[in-house]
Image (spheres, helix red, strand yellow):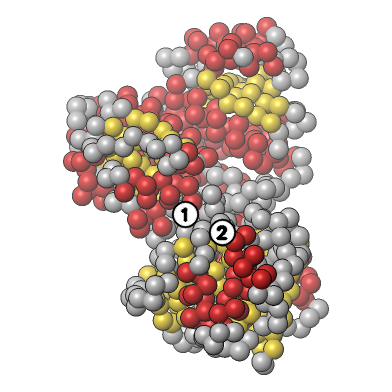
């Protein structure tokens, strides 16, 4: 989950590294550091905390170099402090390594190196890498060969970049399980864990595959595998613009991304709805559409917010396609020896397309012969490349750690997939047209909800000091209750739980008192009367109630403390609307508590380690 950036070329690399790390800070912000090589000398500068603190430290050093690497850390092994920050180095302090991933056998490697006289100064697993590489250099190997040999002994995951004072014309980079890209410039080249770090300098990108190791010079690169096989790498043109990864005048990325949802949803639907035929056209699934419609069973594997989207997808798929659908935590999927049979289809949902658990589940399913399909946002990501087929959500870059527009775009794609399968099976043209028409209206309806921002901010002010929250919903809105609770936990650090409303009586009702805020997702649908009964039960026990309700529902106002009124839509699409107020509520509570909503503690955007 850490951020990696490297530069070699004609310019001073220091500001390039610092700006790249700022772009990558959503991947980790426990500590940061850079190392540079210049005039047959080198230095390393590290600091606990955010990149801005590292930048302040560097300003007084007057550093200038044409070769360097930088890292922003999300701690796994070892406390988040300056000592454990990357880059790590050898005893001579002339070889520097930055690493994203986990070295699972680091203790074994460490003991072997200690017997050779190597001393360790950090608590990290990553520190074994510079010493292990150094041990091969001391046997007369080149830097490239030494990295290659060292990685042959490593078990685990890595995205690494290495520079060496005695070979100052190159960066060595390698990947296994952690994303890494090469950026091609004019007389300069870049290495990064994410395109966003180098987008200001180039749009020519080479994606590294697992097992790739490259030598990057200022004017060319060479690529092999860890096993020393030559590989050809394709250069891709990135269409993303720099404006897309800026705040655009908003105080936080999260608010910007919430407000972008009408447009991001339009992008997710653009060109994909066939209104006259009452169906959808998904180019990425054309080759497998018949197999998909003929699936005996569908599984959805995901983590976090994407798992909640998958739960909504289960409701959609089972209601309209009548195909049994299960939703699996990717982190548990491959460890419980899952039953996967021929004719099963598995969707893997991940905003980044690099989520380690989801990627591992995809690989396991392919071994077992299932049809593995990806639903991702990031073009060229590992899941997108390794799945049999798939669909991009086209949500645009999402920088805020707490996912918002990625969630609603995933719901749109799941709706389109449901429509595609259902129309291939037994859904009527009339029903298909109804869903297609209602889906096209969603962006404008979300725009109407976003106009309630100030009203929701006032509600947030009344609950910013709450210690606990309960979120309740039924049917399609039960996963929304889970998502609303997760958003509040992630960015406000308030304990919150989501439940099916009917389950309240089976335990959670014991928590209800005058200090407990309860959020009911209560649109006027087939479960409305049941939800009203649940509201009455909470009201009788003194709970403070916030209701997300249909705009024409005037009766509910008498039963609750606060209402947030939203437009109506068909039941399967209601989560696209009901989740928006919950995103805004979490955002405003966190802001009023003075917290950093874009970089909540202990979290990182893309979880690329298990």
Q: Nearer the viewer, residue 25 or 172?
A: 172
Residue, x 47% and y 17% (percent of image)?
Answer: 524
Q: Which of marks 2 and 1 is nearer the N terminus?
A: 2
Q: Residue 105 carries which label?
A: 2
- Can residue 450 be seen here? The reply is yes
Residue, x 48% and y 14% (percent of image)?
Answer: 528
Callout 1 secondary element = loop
Left or right of 446: which side holds 130? right
Cα distance in 3D space between marks 2 and 1:
22 Å
Q: How many marks?
A: 2
Tell me where residue 354 appears, x and y as whole percent: 47, 54
Report crowding for label 2: few under 14, some 14 to 19, many 20 or more residues within 10 A (C-alpha): some
* Image marks 2 and 1: residues in contact by CB distance under 8 Å: no
Question: Please, is residue 392 above or below residue 331 in the view?
Answer: below
Q: Residue 123 carries which label?
A: none
**Residue that badge 1 annotates:** 354
Callout 2 secondary element = loop
Question: Please, is residue 15 above or below residue 425 in the view?
Answer: below
Tell me where residue 316 appears, x and y as whole percent: 35, 29
Residue farthest to the bottom, as pictured: 39
Q: In which quarter of the image is residue 315?
A: top left
User: The N terminus appears in which quarter of the rendering?
Assistant: bottom right
Residue, x 41% and y 81% (percent of image)?
Answer: 222
Tell me where residue 6 appears, x and y as whole percent: 57, 75
Q: Closer to the camera: disc 2 or disc 1?
A: 2
Tell me where residue 56 appears, x and y as whole percent: 78, 70
Left or right of 162: which side holds 56? right
Residue, x 34% and y 45% (percent of image)?
Answer: 365
Q: Which of 361 and 264 is in front in this view?
A: 361
Q: Nearer the viewer, residue 154 or 201?
A: 154
Report crowding for label 1: few under 14, some 14 to 19, many 20 or more residues within 10 A (C-alpha): many
Q: Nearer the viewer, residue 79 or 465?
A: 79
């Amino acid at each position: 989950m850490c951020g990696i950036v490297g530069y070699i070329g004609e310019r001073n690399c220091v500001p390039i590294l610092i700006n790249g790390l700022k772009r990558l800070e959503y991947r980790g912000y426990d500590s940061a550091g850079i190392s540079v090589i210049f005039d047959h000398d080198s230095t390393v500068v590290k600091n606990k905390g955010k990149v801005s603190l590292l930048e302040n430290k560097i300003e007084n050093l007057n550093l200038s170099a044409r070769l360097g690497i930088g890292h922003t850390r999300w701690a796994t092994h070892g406390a988040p402090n300056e000592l454990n920050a990357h880059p790590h180095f050898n005893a001579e302090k002339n070889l520097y390594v930055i690493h994203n991933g986990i070295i699972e056998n680091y203790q074994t490697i460490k003991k072997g190196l200690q017997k050779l006289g190597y001393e360790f100064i950090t608590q990290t697993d990553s520190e074994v890498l510079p010493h292990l590489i150094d041990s091969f250099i001391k046997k007369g190997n080149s830097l490239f060969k030494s990295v290659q040999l060292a990685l042959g002994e490593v078990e685990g995951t890595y995205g690494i970049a290495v520079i060496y004072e005695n070979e100052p014309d190159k960066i060595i980079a390698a990947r296994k399980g952690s994303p890494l890209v090469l950026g091609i410039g004019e007389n300069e080249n870049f290495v990064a864990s994410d395109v966003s770090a180098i987008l200001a300098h180039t749009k020519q990108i080479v994606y590294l595959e697992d097992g790739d190791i490259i030598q990057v010079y200022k004017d060319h690169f060479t690529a092999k595998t860890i096993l020393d096989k030559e590989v050809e790498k394709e250069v891709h043109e990135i269409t993303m613009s720099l404006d897309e990864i800026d705040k655009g005048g908003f105080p936080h990325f999260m608010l910007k991304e919430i407000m972008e949802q009408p447009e991001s949803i339009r992008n997710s639907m653009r060109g994909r709805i066939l209104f006259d035929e009452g169906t959808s056209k998904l180019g990425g699934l054309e080759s497998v559409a018949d197999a998909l419609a003929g699936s005996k069973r569908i599984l959805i594997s995901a983590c976090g917010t994407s798992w909640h989207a998958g739960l909504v997808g289960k409701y959609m798929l089972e209601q309209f396609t009548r195909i049994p659908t299960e939703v699996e935590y990717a982190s548990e999927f491959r460890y419980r020896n899952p039953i996967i049979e021929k004719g099963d289809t598995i969707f893997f949902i991940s905003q980044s397309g690099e989520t380690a658990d989801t990627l591992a589940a995809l690989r396991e399913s392919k071994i077992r012969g299932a049809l593995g399909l990806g639903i991702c946002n990031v073009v060229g990501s590992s899941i997108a490349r390794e799945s049999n087929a798939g669909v991009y959500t086209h949500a645009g870059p999402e920088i805020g750690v707490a996912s918002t527009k990625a969630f609603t775009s995933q719901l749109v794609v799941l709706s389109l997939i449901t429509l595609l399968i259902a129309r291939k099976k037994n859904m009527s043209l009339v029903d298909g047209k109804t869903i297609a028409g209602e889906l096209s209206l969603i962006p404008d309806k979300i725009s109407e909800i976003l106009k309630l921002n100030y009203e929701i901010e006032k509600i947030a002010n009344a609950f910013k000091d709450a210690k606990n929250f309960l979120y309740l919903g039924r049917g399609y809105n039960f996963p929304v209750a889970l998502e609303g609770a997760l958003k509040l936990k992630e960015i406000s650090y308030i304990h919150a739980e989501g439940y099916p409303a009917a389950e309240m009586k089976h335990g959670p009702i014991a928590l209800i008192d005058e200090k407990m805020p309860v959020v009911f997702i209560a649109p006027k649908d087939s479960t409305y009367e049941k939800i009203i009964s649940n509201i009455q039960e909470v009201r009788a026990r003194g709970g403070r109630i916030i209701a997300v309700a249909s705009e024409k529902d005037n009766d509910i106002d008498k039963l609750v403390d606060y209402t947030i009124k939203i437009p109506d839509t068909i039941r399967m699409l209601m989560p696209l609307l009901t989740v928006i107020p919950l995103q805004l509520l979490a955002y405003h509570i966190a802001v009023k508590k003075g917290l950093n909503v874009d970089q909540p503690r202990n979290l990182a955007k893309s979880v690329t380690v298990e």
